[in-house]
Image: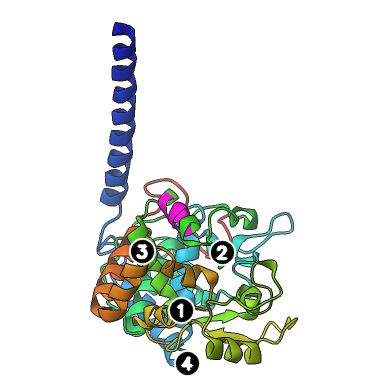
Amino acid sequence: MKRYVKQMIEMSSRILFGILAVVLFCQDVHSQLQVGFYKDTCGSVESIVKQEVRKAFIKDKGVAAGLMRMHFHDCFIRGCDASILLDSTPSSIAEKDSFANNPSLRGYEVIDNAKARLEAVCKGIVSCADIIAFAARDSIEMAGGFGYDVPAGRRDGKTSLASEIIGNMPPPTFNVHQLTQMFARKGFTQEEMVTLSGGHTLGRSHCNAFSDRLYNFSGTSMQDPSLDPRYAAMLKQKCPQGSTNPTVVVPMTSSPSIADAGYYVDILANRGLFTSDHTLLTSPATANQVAEYARNPTQWRTKFAAAMVKMGHLQVLTGTAGEIRANCRVINC
């Protein structure tokens, strides 16, 4: 009995130590990223990035969705290290050329333009990872969401592998349990998962991301019965069965250029585009949250801003780790 008690005490101590280590690590990461990180080294960084985002947004409001999604796709693979920006090489396919990002992800030229201007005035100072974080915030704000302070100090990674997409990025076919598990592995609660899913309020999608819901739901050669029939009919017009036209896209929501709660309103009307959208109605807890955000858009905007700040801390490189790329598309020589 004494031996058993001793083993339990030792096990409890190890668990507590592990929890303490995680807490201290998270606190350390948060302390290394700082709001105003560049105030003494490149004070114009945020205004320069915002100018470039605004120029692109005026030409094409859809770029807001692209830049916001770029931040998400960057942070969920290897952390927020700008690995999403690296070009493929003859020996390696990069994240940007994976099935999850090509041809759907856009906005790379905005980052390139901001980086070129920053290198001209603050050479070797501002990381590509921080530019993505600033640009995502600016995009959300320009699209009607709430702005927020962006802690900075990230450094750029040196590796980008398309093969790491699987297991790290939630596909549009995931159910609520799978989504909850994947987000939990990244440190998010189920509530934060539902909140961040609201990013789908912006943007558009290619047909292959949801065509199974129209023509072969669960391998039945039938339409997903949970889809609103009129909505499904409209989608079928846009995306005929067997179509592989890469230029055809459909809006994610009824207001694809506005960062509002329309995403949640559409889900309640059985007009969630992806399986991973509609699945939020299949759990009482997530369904209640969908209904609450649909009723209270301000609450969603507030929580979405907070969740974006948290996401921006995922596995960041700081201090002397990584590098500050001179060109966001390639690692330094």
Disc 3 is placed on an element classified as helix
Pick the quarter of the image with the N terminus. Answer: top left
> How far across and down, in percent of the image, does residue 13 sit?
29, 23
Q: Residue at x 75, y 81 (%)?
A: 242
> How far across and down, in percent of the image, does residue 82 sit?
49, 61
Q: Residue at x 38, y 83 (%)?
A: 262
Per the image, the residue denoted by label 3 is: 284
Disc 2 is placed on an element classified as loop
Per the image, the residue denoted by label 1 is: 65
* Magenta residues (range): 179-184
Spatial CA span between label 3 and label 4:
41 Å
Q: Residue at x 32, y 68 (%)?
A: 289
Q: Which residue is nearer to you in this view: 265 or 122? A: 265
Q: Marks 4 and 1: CB-CB under 8 Å?
A: no
Disc 1 is placed on an element classified as helix
Task: Judge the density around disc 3: few (<14), some (14-19), many (≥20) Cα neighbours within 10 Å.
Answer: few
The mark lying in front, picked from 4 and 1, is 1
Task: Judge the density around disc 1: few (<14), some (14-19), many (≥20) Cα neighbours within 10 Å.
Answer: many
Disc 4 is placed on an element classified as helix
Q: Can the viewer see residue 39? A: yes
Q: Earlier in the sequence, mark 4 or mark 1?
A: 4
Q: Earlier in the sequence, mark 3 or mark 4?
A: 4
Determine which of the numbered discs, if any, sits on residue 59 in the image.
Answer: 4
The mark tally for this picture is 4
Determine which of the numbered discs, if any, sits on residue 90 in the image.
Answer: none
> How far across and down, in percent of the image, does residue 166 sit?
60, 55
Spatial CA span between label 4 and label 1:
14 Å
Q: Marks 1 and 3: CB-CB under 8 Å?
A: no
Q: Which residue is nearer to you in this view: 81 or 314? A: 314
